[in-house]
Image (tube, helix red, strand yellow):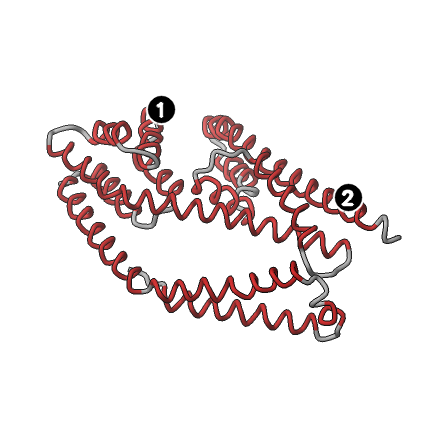
Amino acid sequence: MSDGNEPWALYLLIFILVAVAIQQLQQGLGTARSLRRQKQKRFASLEAAGNPASLEELRRRSTRWSQSFLARHANQLIVQSGTQLAWSTIALMGLGLTLVMSLLLPVPASGALRALLATAVAISLIEGWLRIKRARRIARFGEQLPDVIDVIVRSLRAGHPLAVALNLVARETPHPAGHEFALVVDEVNYGRSLSEALEHLSDRVGYPELRFFVASTAIAHQTGGNLGEILSRLSRMLRDRFRLGRRVRALSAEGRFSGYALSVLPVALFGIINLVSASYYADFWNSAAARPLLAISIALLLVGNLVIYRLVNFKV
């Protein structure tokens, strides 16, 4: 292959790889959605016919895709991030980032290897963006949860049933808590049990402390008890944990800044030098020790980041 035709061949290879990956992922997700729509009808007919063996076999087959790690991870990340973008839009973003990364990657490599590296970097960037959105949304929900519980407690003490209290939270609480509790109310209104609706709420949000609320509410709703007093104590506990968590973050702020600086500085210096003088690293890339030294440098940088992360992040 000549040098003049190599860039076009590289772009074509990148496009084919990304297009095939997108098509396979969308096809798999579409199959999963179709199975979820169809299996309820099939389950009902099998239960009515009294055929438990066939019912169990159908459940096993229809959930095979949904149990795969890639599908569960992708769906959970998108749902918990709260993004309104469709799968096709995210796929187009990935394709565009892959093409951009193939042009910006400074590592000299063959067309296939460069395409794989560009695809990996693009997927990592999109996943990182979704993780940031998920973290912000979870943090916002966590800040709202004590107030949500207080609203429910006041409503229960005023003599309202739990369904009315949840409906009040859905109407009066800002996004994202209000939106999520509105989905809970809708599920209950359409016939789903409160326990299942709350479990779906916990899965959609991904906030660990929400499990306490879900468990206490479901148990008290089924077996009875003073739910208002239980939730009142839970609200106080969550507020105390927030105060302690903010204090810990303030005390560890300097260490986190050091970790960010040490992580960004080597990459930033490399990029600046490469832009100012593109031939500065020419002798290094052409040497036999380039790849081992680069791998060692990346490994040491990752180890340093991991050590700093473990030093400045505490579970409260």
Q: What amino acid type is highlighted by mark number 1?
A: Tyr
Say which of 311 and 277 sits in front.
277
Q: Nearer the viewer, residue 28 or 313?
A: 313
Q: Is residue 212 above or below residue 255?
A: above
Q: Which mark is residue 190?
A: 1
Q: Position of residue 192 (x, y in %)?
A: 35, 29
- The picture places residue 18, in percent across and down from the top left corner, at 68, 44
- Extreme right residue here? 2
User: Label 1 near label 2: C-beta < 8 Å?
Assistant: no
Which label sits on residue 11? none
Question: Residue at horizontal 73%, vertical 67%?
Answer: 282
The image quadrant that residue 29 belongs to is top right
Residue drawn at (25%, 32%) of the image? 169
Which numbered dot is residue 12?
2
User: In the displayed structure, would residue 311 be above or below residue 55?
Assistant: below
Q: Is residue 311 left or right of residue 217?
A: right
x and y percentages locating residue 227 in the rendered image: 16, 40
Q: How much space separates mark 2 and mark 1, taking CA atoms?
A: 49 Å
Q: Residues within 10 Å of mark 1 (few under 14, many from 20)?
A: few
Label count reads 2
- Quarter of the rendering containing residue 61: top right
Marks 2 and 1, the one that precedes in the sequence? 2
Q: Is residue 297 above or below residue 74?
A: below
Residue in the picture at 61% in, 43% down: 94
Say what amino acid the circle numbered 2 marks. Answer: Leu
Helix, strand or loop for disc 2: helix
**Element under label 1?**
loop
Residue placed most toward the observer, 183 or 46: 183
Residue at the image position 53 percent from the left and 28 percent from the top = 38
